Image (spheres, helix red, strand yellow):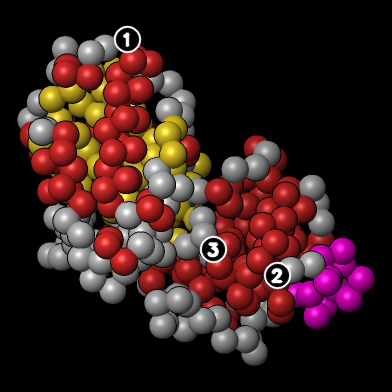
Amino acid sequence: MAIVAGIDLGGTAVNFTLLDSTSGRFLIDGLCEHPALSTHGPDVCLRQIATGLEGAALKAGLPVGDIVAIGLDTPGPASAEGVLSAKGSTNFAHPAWAGFDLRGQLAERLQRRVVYLNDGNAAALWGHNAVFGKDGASSISVIIGTGTGGGLVVDGRMVTGRNGFGGEVGHVLIPWRSIEGLEDIRPQCNCGRVGDLESLCSLTGIRQTLLPHFLTQYPGHPLHGVDVASAATKVRGLADGGDAMSREIFRVQARALGLFFDQMVNLFDPDGFLIGGGALEASPAFRDWFVAEVRAAMPVQREEQAARIEHMPDGDTAGARGAALEAVRVFGV
C-alpha cells in the first residue's frame, strides 16, 4: 500500500484521514480530530499536527512511517504554495503566523512531501470526485460557513489560478437588489466588497446584515434581546424547525446562491453544483427545501442547461479527503 494523509487544519481543530492510493480506499471513516492550538503559534500547532498524525496512523492500525506523502488544507488567505498572508488571518491570528510558510515548514518537520490547498478547494475536490467521478467532468462547489468558500473543478482538475486565489466563489458580486425585500439594504462583506455572495450567504452575513434586517419585521421574535453573534448561530436550527423569520433569512441565502449559480451556468456550463458547509447540516427535509429555493431563484434556462444541484457528501471530512486526493495527483503515489 502507498499511504497518503489528508490534513484539514482549522483554527481550533485539525482533522486527519488516510488514503490507500493503490486501492483508492480511505482507511478512516468519519472524523479523526485533534486540537490544533493555532492561537499558540506555529511551533505548538505543528507539534499538534505531528502528534495527531501519529494518532491517525494508530487508529488505522498502521505505522506512521508508512505515510509517504501529505495533502494539507487550511482557510486562507494564503498563496498557492501554502504561505500565509503577511496581513494575518482570522484562523491564524498569532503574529508569528504572518507570512509563515506553512507547507514548507510542515514538510520539514514531518520529513515528507506536502502539497497545499485552500480548504474550500479541498472540499470541492472531494465532493467532485465523490459525485461526478475523477475524469472529465466539471463542477462548482459552494461551502457555506462563517464565510463562504468553495472551488471550481474543470475537466477533473481544480482551478487554483496564478496565485492560488482561483475559486473564491464567496467574493463574486451578485445582483442582490433583485431579491425581494433587500432593495434598501447594503450587504457589506469583510473583504470590502458590497453585495458579493458571502455578504449574504454565510453566518457572517446573517449576523451583520440579515438578522438585524429581519428582526425589525418580527417585533415579537424570541431572538430580540439576544446577543447578535449568539442569535445568529441559532437561526439555522430555528429555520429547520419551521420558524417563519429564520426561514425568510435562509430563503434570502438560497436566492443569493441561485443568482450565483445562474452566472456560473452561463460562464462555465458545469455538469453540476455542490452545496456544503454548516448551513446545510440540518434535516433532509430542510436541505430539500433549501435546494428548491435555490432553483426557484435561477432565471429560466434552456432545457438543456438545467442545473444539477447536490448536497456535498461527507461534509465534515471533505477537506481532508480532498487534500489527500490532491497529494496523490501531484506526487503520483
Compared to 158, does 245 lie above or below? below
Q: Amino acid at mark 1?
A: Gly
Q: Which residue bears the numbered disc 2?
A: 228
Could you tell me which secondary element the residue under label 3 belongs to?
loop
Q: Which residue bears the numbered disc 3?
A: 202
Residue 226 position by quadrant: bottom right
Query: Disc 3 or disc 1, which is closer to the eye?
Result: 1
Q: Is residue 299 visible?
A: no
Query: Disc 2 or disc 3, which is closer to the eye?
Result: 2
Q: Quadrant of the C terminus?
A: top left
As measured in the structure, the alpha-carbon distance from the residue carrying label 3 to the one carrying label 1 is 39 Å
Compared to 220, does 282 lie above or below? above
List x then y, in percent, for residue 77. Answer: 29, 64
Q: Earlier in the sequence, mark 3 or mark 1?
A: 1
Could you tell me which secondary element the residue under label 2 belongs to?
helix
**Is residue 210 magenta-colored?**
no
Compared to 54, does 186 lie above or below? below
As measured in the structure, the alpha-carbon distance from the residue carrying label 2 to the one carrying label 1 is 45 Å
Q: Which residues are magenta?
A: 214-225
- Tell me: 229 left or right of 147: right
Q: Which residue bears the numbered disc 1?
A: 61
As measured in the structure, the alpha-carbon distance from the residue carrying label 2 to the one carrying label 3 is 14 Å
Q: Residue at x 21, y 52 (%)?
A: 102
Q: Is disc 1 surrounded by few (<14), some (14 to 19) or many (20+) residues within 10 Å?
A: few
Residue 151 position by quadrant: bottom left
Main SS, magenta region, reads: loop
Q: Is residue 25 visible?
A: yes
